Image (spheres, helix red, strand yellow):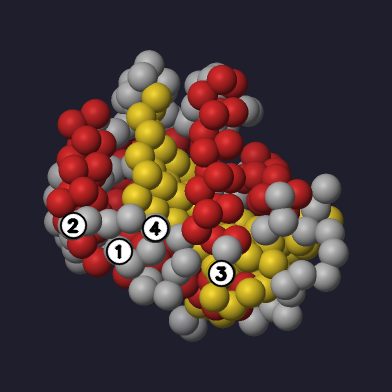
């Protein structure tokens, strides 16, 4: 099993951002992953996911995107309108910048292979992962677990372009995992993402689990689906073995 769980801080622009670092056993050098949390923040579940990656031989850095303002209050997550307002308040540029800073921090570690740093994200973190792949040409790979909005209802200064309209800029292999019964991401939008990746001839894998809800991978929530989660984890490991480890 991976040893780790170390709290680290690193610079992201003028700010300091925190994260939870999980290291594999042994001396490396290892491939590495930035792990991007759900809308709930850097929870024990996401820390555990970083540890699972460490157990598989990847340095995992679970980045805290709420390092500046602290995690959202429960009332900010109680209904869809409040959750949407929270996400809308977070500038995409800042979120992607934090992921890029986390990747740079990983590359600074002696046990990390500098050319083998990827990103994996869940829920809101899935959207951030997709955006990071669009804006970060030196990522080695990306894995999106049921990212949030693919098509923004409103284009703003903080949300200047819908993620699906940016995928032509992706340079790394990408795996996208979605639930077919995801109430947060309409199935036509998911299919549009798949079709757009195909149109731009990207290197990608895509899996939609029929009947699976949003957050089906999170084993701490009522939406957890163990069979789909197990399959998605194996797909992720196979994808990373092919595109990140080698």
Q: Classify 10 Å Cα crowding around label 2: few (below 14), some (14-19), many (20 and above).
A: few
Mark 2 or mark 4, which has the lower sequence index?
4
| Cα gap from disc 2 to disc 4, whole angstroms | 13 Å
| Cα gap from disc 3 to disc 1, whole angstroms | 16 Å
Q: Classify 10 Å Cα crowding around label 4: few (below 14), some (14-19), many (20 and above).
A: many
Q: Secondary structure at mark 2?
A: loop
Pointer 1 with pointer 2, Cβ within 8 A: yes
Measured from the top left, where is residue 206 in percent x and y?
35, 40
Q: Which mark is residue 116?
A: 3
Residue wearing tag 2: 200
Q: Secondary structure at mark 4?
A: loop
Residue wearing tag 4: 173
Q: Secondary structure at mark 3?
A: strand
4 or 1: mark nearer the eye:
4
Q: Which mark is residue 170?
A: 1
Q: Does the rendering let one see residue 92?
A: no
| Cα gap from disc 4 to disc 1, whole angstroms | 8 Å
């Amino acid at each position: 099993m991976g040893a780790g769980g170390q709290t680290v801080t690193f610079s992201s622009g003028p700010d300091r951002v925190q994260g939870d670092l999980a290291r594999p056993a042994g001396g490396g050098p290892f491939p590495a992953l930035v792990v991007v949390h759900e809308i709930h923040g850097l929870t024990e579940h996401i820390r555990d996911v970083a540890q699972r990656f460490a157990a598989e031989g990847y340095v995992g850095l679970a980045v805290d995107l709420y390092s500046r303002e602290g995690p959202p209050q429960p009332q900010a997550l109680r209904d869809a309108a409040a959750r949407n307002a929270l996400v809308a308040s977070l500038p995409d540029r800042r979120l992607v910048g934090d992921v890029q800073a986390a990747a740079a921090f990983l590359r600074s570690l002696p046990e990390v292979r500098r050319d083998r740093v990827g990103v994996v994200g869940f829920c809101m973190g899935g959207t951030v992962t997709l955006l990071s792949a669009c804006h970060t040409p030196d990522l080695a790979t990306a894995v999106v677990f049921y990212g949030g909005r693919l098509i923004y209802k409103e284009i703003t200064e903080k949300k200047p372009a819908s993620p699906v309209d940016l995928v032509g800029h992706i340079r790394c292999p990408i795996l996208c995992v979605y639930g077919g019964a995801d109430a947060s991401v309409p199935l036509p939008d998911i299919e549009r993402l798949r079709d757009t990746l195909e149109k731009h001839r990207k290197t990608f894998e895509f899996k939609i689990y029929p009947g699976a809800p949003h957050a089906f991978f999170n084993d701490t929530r009522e939406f957890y689906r163990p069979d789909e989660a197990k399959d998605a984890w194996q797909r992720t490991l196979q994808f990373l073995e092919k595109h990140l480890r080698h």
